[in-house]
Image (cartoon, rainbow, N blue to C red):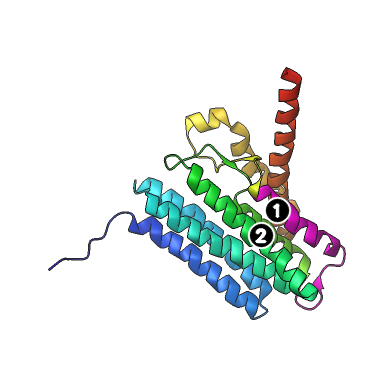
Amino acid sequence: MNRLRITPSIIPNMFTAMNMFCGFLSIINAASGEYIYACWLILIAALFDMLDGTMARLTNSSSALGVQLDSLSDLVSFGVAPSFLIYKTYLIQYNAMGIIISSFLMIAGGLRLARFNVQLVGFTKSYFTGLPIPSAAIAVATFIIAFYTKSVGFNPAVINYIIPIVFILSYLMVSNIKYDTFPKFTKKGLKDKPYLYVSPLILVLIIIFIPLKRILFLIFVLIILFGIFRHIYNSFSKIKLK
């Protein structure tokens, strides 16, 4: 009789499964009109997404299967869920065109994940090519948390920015702009990228003085802009060297 074999890989895979489950719950809540709950579920999914990689390293159980499962979970939680959210909260009024525009986040995210899997060598990377799909999804979720209320809908001051945000995030995911990975707390990491360790401390201080709803969105705007400005700076530097 064969006994069920439990391997260390089951631990990170459980976190990955919880990521996917949160994405599924987000879609259900969005379909029921509970948009803010749906947004927070995307943020919780992002937490599980971060923890599955950490657990894989701690248990030394990184695998090709885990990479594929992680990408499938990310497509649900950070591709389908935010696309459906932005459609239900605003783009639904544009009918078929609204469906097409809102799907850009999902389609670009799928392309981003496929490219990541094809280019992945080993199980660690020093940077990401293109905006990571969780960052794009968190930007959408925090934008809705910051500027949407059930009684009024979106704040009129931000309505004109919604469609451009969808286009910009979709483009950034499939672009060649480099974004740093989450820092690992090592002496080498501190020496190579000290700003990644100082930034969280600065953000904690900012949170004390700015309402939480707005600061969550602001943080991810700054992360996205930092990657863009660095890409522009590096491009001009290469031109000058020529």
Look at the numbered disc 1 and give the secondary structure of its residue. helix
Task: Identify the residue position indicated by label 1 in the image.
Answer: 169
Closer to the camera, 112 or 88?
Answer: 112
Residue 81 place in picture, x, y as percent:
61, 67
How would you rate the neighbour count of disc 2 (Cα within 10 Å): few for under 14, some for 14-19, many for 20 or more? many
Relative height, residue 175 to residue 158 (above, below): above
Q: Which residues are magenta?
A: 149-173
Residue 90: tell me if it is visible.
no
In percent of the image, x 44 and y 52: which residue is there? 67
Task: Identify the residue position indicated by label 2 in the image.
Answer: 105
Closer to the camera, 136 or 196?
Answer: 136
In percent of the image, x 68 and y 45: which residue is there? 223
Relative height, residue 239 to residue 48 (above, below): above
In the drawing, does residue 99 fall left or right of residue 28? right
Residue 232 place in picture, x, y as percent:
74, 34
Q: Amino acid at mark 1?
A: Leu
Q: Earlier in the sequence, mark 2 or mark 1?
A: 2
Q: Are marks 2 and 1 in contact (CB under 8 Å)?
A: yes
In the drawing, does residue 150 fall left or right of residue 49? right
Quadrant including the N terminus: bottom left
Q: Residue furthest top?
A: 241
Q: Amino acid at mark 2?
A: Leu
| Separation of residues labelled 2 and 1 (CA atoms) | 7 Å
Q: Residue furthest right?
A: 157
In percent of the image, x 43 and y 60: which residue is there? 15
- Say which quarter of the image contains residue 194: top right
Closer to the camera, 200 or 235?
Answer: 235
